[in-house]
Image (tube, rainbow, N blue to C red):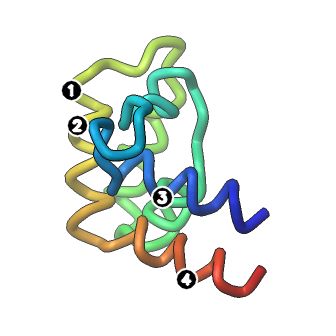
Amino acid sequence: MAFQLIDDALDYAGSASIFGKPTLADLPEGKITMPVIILLKTLPATEATRLAHLLDADHIAPATVFEVARLVDRHDTAARTVERAHVY
């Protein structure tokens, strides 16, 4: 569980050149990981509803991926995911 949470956080906060794998790859594959789950719980209801609607699409547009990445960064949900990993 800890490994997966760290992997989820690194998808938003990591560097492809350092970790040897692409970043921001989970969301385009339809994977809603812990940083996004925490984000949806953190945002005000209207913003969370709008974001949930965007994430519910069959294809998540690159603009949506970058918007989510900015929100994850602004609300520090990747770091909060790492904090959860420490519990495990």
- Count all numbered tags in the image, as a single digit: 4
State the residue position of label 2: 66
State the residue position of label 3: 9
Residue in the foreground of this view, choosing between 85 and 29: 85
Comparing marks 2 and 4, which lies closer to the viewer? 4
Look at the numbered disc 4 and give the secondary structure of its residue.
helix
Q: Mark 3 or mark 1, which has the lower sequence index?
A: 3
Question: At 37% from the left edge and 35% from the top edge, which residue is drawn?
Answer: 24
Looking at the picture, which amino acid does disc 3 mark? Ala
Coordinates of residue 21 in the picture (x, y in percent)? 44, 32
Cβ atoms at labels 1 and 2 below 8 Å apart:
yes
Asked if residue 85 can be seen in this view, the reply is yes
Labelled disc at residue 63: 1
State the residue position of label 4: 83
Comparing marks 4 and 1, which lies closer to the viewer? 4
Residue in the foreground of this view, choosing between 39 and 86: 86
Looking at the picture, which amino acid does disc 1 mark? Ala
Question: At 33% from the left edge and 56% from the top edge, which residue is drawn?
Answer: 13
Q: Residues under labels 2 and 4: Cα distance?
A: 23 Å
Q: Residues under labels 1 and 2: Cα distance?
A: 5 Å
Coordinates of residue 84 in the picture (x, y in percent)? 63, 79
Work out whether 50 lies above or below 79.
Answer: above
Q: Mark 4 or mark 1, which has the lower sequence index?
A: 1
Q: Residues within 10 Å of mark 3 (few under 14, many from 20)?
A: many
Q: Residues under labels 3 and 4: Cα distance?
A: 10 Å
Looking at the picture, which amino acid does disc 4 mark? Glu
